[in-house]
Image (cartoon, rainbow, N blue to C red):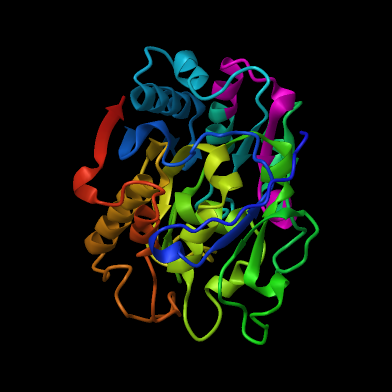
Amino acid sequence: MSISRRDYLRTVAGVVAGASFLSADTGTSAPGMPGAYRGKVIAVKHNNCIRKEAFQATAINAMVSRGMCDLTGATDQTEAWRSFFSPGDVVGIKMSPVGQPFVCSSPEMLNAIIAGVVSAGVKLTDIVVYERYRSNVDSTGLTHWVPPGVRVTWAAPEYSGNQMGMDGYDPDHFVELPFVMPGESLTDPRANRSFAATFVTREINKLINVPSLKSHNAAGVTLALKSLSHGLVNNVNRSHDGPELRIADFIPGVVSMPVIRQKTVLNILDGTKGLYHGGPGIMNDDYVWEHKTAYFATDPVALDRIGLTVIEAQRKKNHLKSVGAYAVDDVWKSPHRQPEHIDNAGKAGLGEWDLAKIQLKSVELK
């Protein structure tokens, strides 16, 4: 895709007032998130989407079809998908396999989404499935999940503590925030900037974000917003490593980047299975439950606000404190988790954070 250079400095209200952006032309003038359906979340449950611990394609296809129709008001799923995608679009699908093998989107969910995109007239060769680390792609077998023609890509080979390498990232798109990893200098541009993956800047023009329903040791929850903020840029460890956590600042700042905000058109939260304590990595399934629900939204803030209530309810059911409580145990090592990144993202204009203003529609299929 041809990109014309356009540098500009933007200030975002509230918590990201100090964030500076350098961004080449994103190829669209659309405002992006929260998208066409601010404050609207569709929850679709199907008790048969998992049977005998196996994901069921027929039930999951039905969940995706119903969720897309109810989100858009379309009478059939092809019409629903066409409201987002057209022939000629290059569509990225951002996966979140960190919780494998216990909480991770399934091949069935991914292929239901791919089928929907294809029904809108997008070629299989114009669909790109992405995960930040190749090691996660390989360990999940993600390349074997997709039909022939669909490409699978990544930004970096594997996780590392120093995340300032530029291979797989675009020097023309970054967010600058005033904090760095311990031992790094605030005057070093590599240390105080996070650069967007070339996947989102150069390879696609629209993005579907597919997070899983999980709690998180530092962020409280890792849902739509964190999937974007920590999965599409480098130098993310500076948000949760050091004398204080800066996740509540980092997440809204990164998601406000024009190239991420404008290209992310749809969020599908896979809650077929969920994690309510610990995370993002999972050593066992002690805190995993079969939620059997998928959530659909263009608004990532509203989606995360609903996801937080779901995880909190499951924690209460299992006699655990709120994710924001100052408590440390054998699973959660951090004394301070920051689910307030959801409210801060709302205040930064990325979506609806006030639960009273969120329209949640729940559907149960049989």
Q: Is residue 316 left or right of residue 107?
A: left
Q: Nearer the viewer, residue 312 or 300?
A: 300
Name the spot of residue 282 as percent of width and height, x first. Answer: 52, 63
Compared with residue 220, is residue 108 higher up or lower down, i.e. above or below? above
**For residue 210, above or below residue 90:** below
Q: Is residue 158 above or below residue 294?
A: below
Q: Is residue 277 above or below residue 148?
A: below
Q: Residue at x 54, y 27 (%)?
A: 112
In percent of width and height, residue 184 lies at 68, 83
The residue lying toward the viewer, choosing from 139 and 244, is 244
At x 45%, y 80%, the residue is 333
Instruction: Name the residue nearer the viewer: 274 or 116.
Output: 116
The answer to whether residue 124 is magenta is yes
Name the spot of residue 54 as percent of width and height, x first: 50, 38
Residue 248 shown left or right of residue 184 in the figure: left
How many numbered marks are there?
0
> At 67% across and 39% down in the image, what residue appears?
129
Q: Is residue 365 visible?
A: yes
Residue 102 shows in this picture: no
The residues colored magenta run: 114-138
Left/right of residue 58 with respect to residue 177 in the rendered view: left
Q: Is residue 227 magenta?
A: no
Task: Specify the quadrant that holds the N terminus.
Answer: top right
